[in-house]
Amino acid sequence: MSKALVISTAICASLFTLNVHAQTRKVQGTVVDSDQKGLMGVSVTVSGTKFVAVTDKNGKFNIEIPGKNQELQFTYVGFQTRRVKLSADQAVIRVVLEEQSNALEEVTVNIGYGTVKKKDLTGAVTSVGAETISKAPVSSALEAIAGRMAGIQISSTEGSPDAEMKVRVRGGGSVTGDNAPLYIVDGFPMSSISDIAPADIESIDVLKDASSAAIYGSRGANGVVIVTTKSAKSGKTSISYNAFGGIRNLAKKLDVLSPYDYVTWQYEQALLQNKLDTYVKYFGNFQDIDLYKDVPSNDWQELIFGRTGNTFNQNFNLSGGVIRRNIQFLIPL
């Protein structure tokens, strides 16, 4: 009986072992770049599992694949991640990884009278593109970039809706002089950019240090704000329309005294300063102070800022061009 039990147990164990081996298979392969050179250190992972392998100096690897149809993921620094699906009986694979394009290679920054690639830039320059500017529901370009540039402080000079925006690049450099930066719009110096619609701006570059703004001389001592507007491009004629509306209210008002509270406070001050004659001259006898309870007060904050301000902004652009005839046009309205 014991021998039969041992034999049956051994048979079951053998079947289990065969079943485990049947569930996994080996796959070997090579990972190369676009020049067909082997890549060392590429991480090869079976998607959704913990099965991982690393390529050797020749780009070769071996990995255990669970199941029949699996997907391999190839990851390497500086190259695009690639996923490859394997067939049920595939045992050998060759994968070509493409280099990842560097974003800094494609980004250009306006400096002085030309442009440079961002990777070659050594000065302190901050840039904001048209996509970021167009997403902000504001009527001023400076409001659109507020809080989006390091070292740039943008605030309103007063509470009116059409108030001029104050810009400071890395703080003020002068106590008595003007700390406003130099504005350059498409190569021309301007006193302000408040009149430019945000939808018409392609990019805004701010030169923050002396090395990047040196070409502008002393005028760029407080920084330089370079605005590049949209230009005509060849292609099919396109029409775009953008509109937004909003309301503005005073966020908070200061608490003020009522006429009765104000006269009471003046009486207490007159007692402390021994100037009751002056108090009586302006406010009357203290015995009649209750008369001020019925005196209406003027809330100047409400009278000046209490109204709701309505804002409505709309932009219409028509652009296009023909390459063969060298005709391009951009009509913003």
Image (cartoon, rainbow, N blue to C red):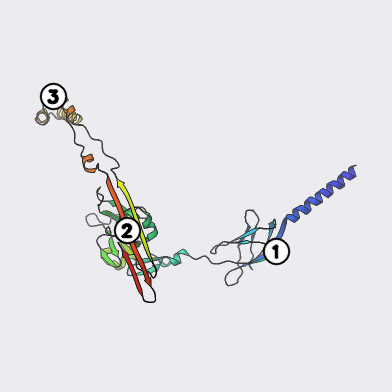
User: Residue 194, percent across and down?
Assistant: 27, 57
Task: Say which element carries label 1.
Answer: loop
User: Residue 42, percent across and down?
Assistant: 60, 63
Which-is-in-front pick, marks 3 and 2?
2
Earlier sequence position, callout 3 versus callout 2:
3
Q: CA distance from mark 1 to mark 2?
A: 60 Å
Q: Residues within 10 Å of mark 2 (few under 14, many from 20)?
A: some
Q: Which image quadrant for residue 96?
A: bottom right
Q: Amino acid at mark 3?
A: Asp
Earlier sequence position, callout 1 versus callout 3:
1
Q: Residues within 10 Å of mark 1 (few under 14, many from 20)?
A: some
User: Residue 45, percent across and down?
Assistant: 63, 58
Quickly name the residue at label 1: 91
In the displayed structure image, the side of residue 6 where residue 257 appears, left or right: left
Earlier sequence position, callout 1 versus callout 2:
1
Label at residue 315: 2
Q: Is residue 42 above or below residue 289?
A: below
Quickly name the residue at label 3: 288
Task: Say which element carries label 2.
Answer: strand
Q: Residue at x 33, y 69 (%)?
A: 329
Task: Say which element carries label 3.
Answer: helix
Q: Residues within 10 Å of mark 3 (few under 14, many from 20)?
A: few
Count all numbered tags in the image, as a single digit.
Answer: 3
In the displayed structure image, the side of residue 33 where residue 210 appears, left or right: left
Q: Amino acid at mark 1?
A: Ala
Q: Is residue 154 above or below residue 321?
A: above
Q: Amino acid at mark 2?
A: Asn
